[in-house]
């Protein structure tokens, strides 16, 4: 049976799990937190590259800032879209005001900007606030 590597949204450790079409239960081998947790992970300089480089599933990153009205408006839609992809994609957020050094290498000119990473490489990008359905469509193009 094939395996995939997934980064725990709680402790940020890499887990190797069997590749399945659907998961009823999946827990981290380190912290015992659920790997099925779809709540977007807040990434920091310490955790960003672990998630982007070590995960075999797409990592969908919302680059946002607390002062950005469209970012705040899109947040519930982003969380709603995330609920549709347990262990198919990992949703994350980067606060560009707090961690400008994470956004700078990607040439982000406006927020919110969503970037989809797969295999450590940017594979898709969209700027501007989107409804949950459009976010889900973007992500579905990159899930197996």
Image: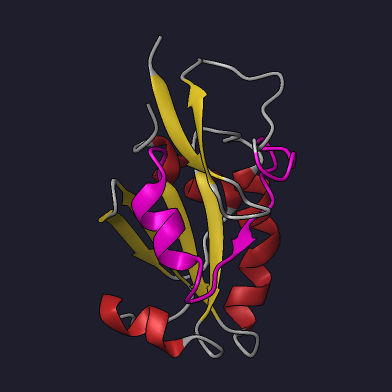
Name above or below for residue 106 compared with residue 52. below
Name above or below for residue 62 compared with residue 131. below
Q: Nearer the viewer, residue 52 or 39?
A: 52
Q: Which residue is drawn at 61% across and 56% down?
A: 78
Q: Image check: 128 left or right of 74?
A: left
Name above or below for residue 30 compared with residue 16. below
Asked whether residue 114 is in view, the answer is no
For the rendered model, the colour scheme is secondary structure
Specify the quadrant that holds the N terminus. top left
Q: What stretch is highlighted in magenta?
A: 30-58
Q: Which residue is drawn at 59% across and 85% down?
A: 68
Q: Residue at x 42, y 38 (%)?
A: 57
The percent position of residue 27, horizontal first and vertical second, equals 69, 32
Locate residue 28: give its quadrant. top right
The percent position of residue 48, horizontal first and vertical second, equals 45, 66
Q: Which of 74 and 44 is in front in this view?
A: 44
The percent position of residue 67, horizontal first and vertical second, equals 64, 90
Q: Which residue is drawn at 39% across and 33% down?
A: 143
Specify the quadrant that holds the C terminus. top left
């Amino acid at each position: 049976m094939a395996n995939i590597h997934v980064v725990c949204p709680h402790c940020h450790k890499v887990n190797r799990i069997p590749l399945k079409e659907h998961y009823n239960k999946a827990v981290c081998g380190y912290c015992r937190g659920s790997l099925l947790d779809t709540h977007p992970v807040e990434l920091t300089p310490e955790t960003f590259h672990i998630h982007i480089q070590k995960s075999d599933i797409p990592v969908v990153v919302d680059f946002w800032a607390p002062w950005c009205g469209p970012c705040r408006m899109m947040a519930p839609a982003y969380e709603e879209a995330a609920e549709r992809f347990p262990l198919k994609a990992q949703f994350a957020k980067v606060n560009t005001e707090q961690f400008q050094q994470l956004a700078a290498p990607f040439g982000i000119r406006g927020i919110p900007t969503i970037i989809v990473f797969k295999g450590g490489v940017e594979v898709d990008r969209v700027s501007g606030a989107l409804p949950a359905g459009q976010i889900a469509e973007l992500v579905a193009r990159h899930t197996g």
